[in-house]
Structures are given as C-alpha cells and as structure tokens.
Amino acid sequence: MNDYEKRLDYLTPEQHEKILFYFIKKGKIETFLKIVSKGYGLTPFILNALIDFGYEAVVQQAIQSSVRLANECYPFLCSYWGEKKTNDFLISCNYVNYIKENFSDKTLVEYHLWDILAQKEKFFILAQHGQFDVLAEYKQYLILVKYGQLDYACHKGLFQFLAFTKAGMERLIQLKKWKEVFGGTSFTSFNGFSVSDILEILYDNGMQELLFAMCCDDFLLDYKKYTKPYIENKKWGTLAFFGFYDVIDWEDYLGQVIESKKEDVYKNAVAAKNWEFLAKHEQHKLLFKAKQFKWWWKSFH
C-alpha cells in the first residue's frame, strides 16, 4: 500500500463515495478512473451511479482499475450481470483475494479454482474432487492417506504417512518398510495396530537390530530375552538392569563408567552374586554386608 492509499484510509466509505460521485455527476470520467486506480473504493452505490448516469460501459473498466472493491459489489454485480458473467469477469481480472472472499466453495469447484480452495484450507473438498497433487503441494499428506491414496503416497515417497491408517500399515508391511512400520507405534489409536502387534511383526521379520536401535529394551530383553545386540554393543548397564548378569563382561562394564558411577557397578555385582569380582576390587564393605566372609577375607589379599 502506497502513501496515497494510506492517506485514503482516514476517509470513511461515505466520503469516498461522495468524491467519486462528484466526478461522475460532472462527467469527469478520466479523473474518476484515475483516482479509483489510486485507491478510492468502489461500492454498489458508485457502480449504480455509473449505470444511471449513462456510463455503463465504464463499469468494467472501473472494476479493472480498482484496488478497493467493496465485498458488497459482488452480489450487486450478480444481480446486474448475472452470476456467471460476474464470476467470469472477476476470474479474468485475476482478483484472487476478492474471489477467495466472495466465491462460494461450490463456485470455486465449478471453476476449478483448486489453489484458492487450498488457501482457504478446504482440503477435504479437494480430496473429494481428486486434487491430490494440490494436497501434496500443501503438505496435506494425512488426508491423502485417509482417502485411500496409498499408491499416490508410495509414488511420492510419503511412506511415513501410511502409518496413520490400517490399510497404510498393511501396505508398509507388504513393502517391508520397517522403519515406517515402527513409526506406526506412535499412531496406534488411528491405525488399529497395538504397539505389541507392531513389535512382534518387526521381530518376526528379523528386525531385531532396528528394535535395538529404537531402544525397545522391555520388549527385547524382558519379553523376548534377546541379548545379542546388547552384548555386541557392550550395553552392560542395560543387561544388568534386566538381570542378565551371566553375559556381562564385568571388567569392561567397570571400565566404561566414570568414577562416581562405579558404585552402581558394584551394587549390580552384589545382585549378580559375583563375589570374586567384588573381592578383586576390594569391596570389603559390600562383601561383609552380604555376609560373604570368605570373599571378604580374600578382598584384603
């Protein structure tokens, strides 16, 4: 908005009409069109004055020149020209914001004004009319999936969004998109799969490493008793937490932790009844408290 238009903001619509009407009445149409193009607002009253004073041919030019066309002009023009001619004219003028404000959803569909519908966030209308490219452009991927556009989503590489529906999850399993299948654990209230269902599917399809990477410790260790990746990656603290004491490399475990955490290792060794390890590291107090007097004695030698 330029300084001229900003100055016109201080005038009321009635004052705009009064000035424009003056030039119509005086027949100064060139001046009228000039100040309309600079920011004076058109209203039904002014359009009607043009018609009544014999300047009907100027109506289209005035609208094309206008930067401020009152919303009330739309029903006026529909009454004067008919809805189709009015719509065709406004579209030809590319009055996007005005069209967005005044056209009904039905009219926008009729004229295939899909982008304006998207700007108005009428995404379900777009889906109903198969405008999936527009939905993708506006990142409405969930609606695509909800409307069953699984092939489209796959073609566009939008696999992660399939996890929101049951059909989408089934497609992910079929395609062996295991990371995306795991993502479905966050959307179980939508896709009909329980977390345990998803974890079992992944486990049965050899995705133990993925489950390990996703920190599914309860499932792998407590439920499946599967320790392999934890041993390979020396996750001794996690193994100790779940009670897998017999597979722990205690010396390596002790060497992993900072000084202030070594006490935790020794406490786990007590739970594991690894008296020899405790004696080697001179844990006299813990051995005595556990009534392991033979090992307590050895811890001094």
Image (cartoon, grey):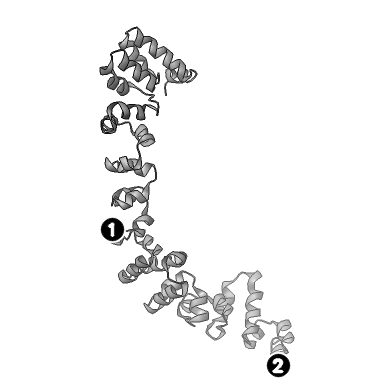
Name the amino acid, label 2.
Lys
Q: Which residue is mark 1?
A: 152
Instruction: Compute the Cα span from label 2 to label 1.
Output: 72 Å
**Badge 2 vs badge 1, beta-carbon distance below 8 Å:** no
Q: Residue 38: which quarter of the image?
A: top left
Identify whether 133 is placed above or below 248. Answer: above
Residue 131: image x %, image y %? 29, 50
- Reading the image, the residue beneath label 2 is 294
Q: Between residue 257 and residue 86, name the one nearer to us.
A: 86
In this view, 17 is above or below 274: above
Q: Quick check: can you spot residue 144?
A: yes
Q: Residues within 10 Å of mark 2 (few under 14, many from 20)?
A: few
Q: Which of the two labelled residues, at mark 2 and mark 1, occupies the earlier sequence position?
A: 1
| Residue 145, horizontal then vertical, whole percent | 35, 59
User: Tag 1's secondary structure?
Assistant: helix
- Which corner quadrant of the image does residue 113 belong to? top left
The kind of secondary structure element at disc 2 is helix
Q: Is residue 42 visible?
A: no
Residue at image position (37%, 42%) is 119
Q: Three-letter amino acid code at disc 1?
A: Tyr
Q: Quadrant of residue 115?
A: top left
